[in-house]
Image (cartoon, rainbow, N blue to C red):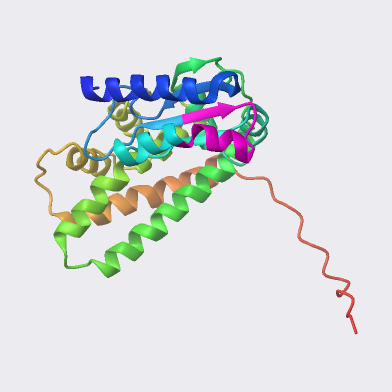
Amino acid sequence: MKTAIREDLSQFTERLQIAAGSNLDCLALYGSAARSEFNERYSDLNLLIVLRDTSRTALDQIAPAISWWTHHQQHRPPLITTEQELRSSADVFAIETLDLITTHRILAGRDLISSIDVPMDLHRIQLEHELRTLLLKLRQHYLVSQHDERELQGTLAKSASTAITLFRHALIALGRPPAESKREVITAVAQLEDIDPAPLQAALDLREGRRIEAGIDTLYHRYMDAIAALVRLIDQAVPKPRAQRPDRTSSPERIG
């Protein structure tokens, strides 16, 4: 991480502490910057602020610090929550919470993150949802930008981080040893049956500014094929519990 970014984080931490005072429970850096995989071109500085009170008055107090961070320094706005919200939302944000637990750095306050419990059955459901959503969006983008290699290349580069994050969580769902770095995830993916890691490697190379030899059109399809294969693997190897159908024997009562 460059010195300028470290200075931004240091200044924001000081500004937030002064503005929030005793209302600040925790300020944490998470994501690629906390893993030392920050890419200045594509990565954001992801911050989580945990406040004791999130009333209008409390938010107004920290607004100048947030404005400095987002408008003056041009960084992504932080997420703002309370400890109770953070813990109770682990069921609907299972992937995000698990990533937050495994990769975070406390900049100020208490570590409220490491002790959060993540329901892994719901983690598996969210994983498949996110994978299928990514695949649908990639297909849409291909049809819209079919003959625009620059657009397709940009999509591969931008989506690489998300795709590799989902592959990392797929390894977790399949009971495989956890992988930390993006390159380690790709190496581990190579051990999965019927999944070609090469398009993931190429997409990451594009994200990191490296040249690739494969044609973009062919690479894009191989990339989608790898994601589709992972969806099938997760669906078969880690079956989701089947919910009961709603009772359709009775009709809703008419009004009027």
Asked if residue 61 lies in the magenta stretch, the reply is yes
Q: Residue at x 14, y 39 (%)?
A: 209
Q: In the image, 215: left or right of 239?
A: left
Q: Position of residue 19 (x, y in %)?
A: 49, 25
Q: Residue at x 53, y 32 (%)?
A: 61
State whether residue 2 appears in this view: no
> Which residues make up the magenta segment?
48-63
Q: Position of residue 201 (x, y in %)?
A: 23, 38
In what quadrant of the picture does the C terminus appear?
bottom right
Asked if residue 144 lies in the magenta stretch, the reply is no
Q: In the image, 101: left or right of 256?
A: left
Count of number-bearing discs = 0
Q: Position of residue 211 (x, y in %)?
A: 9, 41
Q: Residue at x 61, y 37 (%)?
A: 57
Q: Position of residue 235 (x, y in %)?
A: 53, 47
From the viewer's side, name the closer residue of 81 and 58: 58
Residue 151: image quadrant is: bottom left
Residue 121: image quadrant is: top right
